[in-house]
Amino acid sequence: MKKSLIALAVLAASGAAMAQSSVTLYGVVDTGLTYSKGDESVYGMTHVGGNVNSRLGFRGVEDLGNGLKATFNLEAGMGVDDGNNYMGGGDGLAFRRTSTVGLQGSFGEVRLGRMLTSSYLAVSRYDAFGDTGIGASRAWSQGYAARSENAISYTSPNFSGFKIGAEYGFGEQQKASDKRYIGIGAMYDNGPLSLGLGVDRLNGDTKNNTDLDENQTTWHLGGSYNFGVAKLLGFYKESKFKETGLNAGNDSTKFKTFGLGVTAPVGAAGEVRASYN
């Protein structure tokens, strides 16, 4: 009897501790049939997703007491048409979309690992197609680094609709400044009005590149207003690529994009989107 009582007491203590933490499994599976016509016509299945990118993820939180929480997030991308990972790193499942561990409190949240940057998150949301699928803008696909790795990230609490975030990505190269990332993003959301501003810099890899690489500096801003029957969105982005490396000259290139879009709800779950980029 005594042994049974001890066992029950241990189980009760274990249950109380486990109640303070949770792990969530989540994901999206999205594909479709597409046809595009340009210099050459292409048709087939959508690889990364037609409406949102397909993914599988795990996120967790544990209450540490005194208002502090430990967090983690692992998220892998997949192509539904062939089941392969589309984020690089081979054909197997790899957590290249997000791989972080962090600490959350009244001060905000600090995370370590690989994540979408605050600069990207602040402005890409004003692409009517969410930077996904055949209708997405090419603003964030022309060599732009939407994610930073080997990084430390800070996100502030929400102050009356205003929030700010920043990342520093260690290059982890022989030359300290190589592949280093620095970025900041600011967001304001108040009722129907939404605004975002982002600035970031990614250094080239001069030591490990035998020819040329490029430093990338970007600023972008955007906004939206929801009228209820429809939401209007717009953004402007400018990236400057400057050659670096052993044989670099002084050549630089600017890549400018803008987008105007509108989304409108249809029924309880439907939506119509249109944009010009």
Image (tube, rainbow, N blue to C red):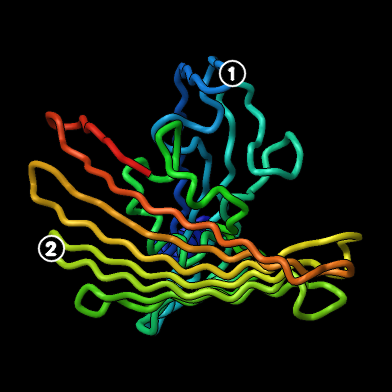
> Depth-wise, is mark 1 or mark 2 nearer the camera?
1
Task: Report whether 127 appears left or right of 34.
Answer: left
Report the residue at 78% width, 72% height from top. 172
Report the residue at 70% width, 75% height from top. 170
How far is the residue under mark 1 from the one under mark 2? 45 Å
Please tell me in which quadrant of the rendered image residue 98 appears.
bottom right
Instruction: Say which residue label 2 marks.
Output: 191
Work out whether 248 lies above or below 30. below
Question: Measured from the top left, where is residue 14 in percent x and y?
Answer: 49, 62
- The tag on residue 108 is none
Work out whether 95 lies above or below 215. above
Report the residue at 40% width, 55% height from top. 124
User: How busy is the neighbourhood of tag 2: few (under 14 within 10 Å), some, or many (20 plus)?
Assistant: few
Question: Measured from the top left, where is residue 208 in percent x and y?
Answer: 88, 64
Amino acid, disc 1: Glu
Quadrant containing the C terminus is: top left
Asked if the residue under mark 2 is in contact with the one under mark 1, i.e. CB atoms within 8 Å, the reply is no
Question: Measured from the top left, where is residue 52 in percent x and y?
Answer: 42, 37
User: How busy is the neighbourhood of tag 1: few (under 14 within 10 Å), some, or many (20 plus)?
Assistant: few
Q: Count the marks.
A: 2
Report the residue at 26% width, 70% height from top. 188
Do we see residue 28 in this rendering? yes
Nearest the viewer among 154 and 237 is: 237
Q: Secondary structure at mark 1?
A: loop
- The tag on residue 40 is 1
Nearest the viewer among 235 and 18 is: 235
Task: Report whether 245 appears left or right of 152.
Answer: right
Question: Measured from the top left, where is residue 244 in percent x and y?
Answer: 78, 69
Decide which of tag 1 and tag 2 comes sooner along the chain: 1
Amino acid, disc 2: Gly
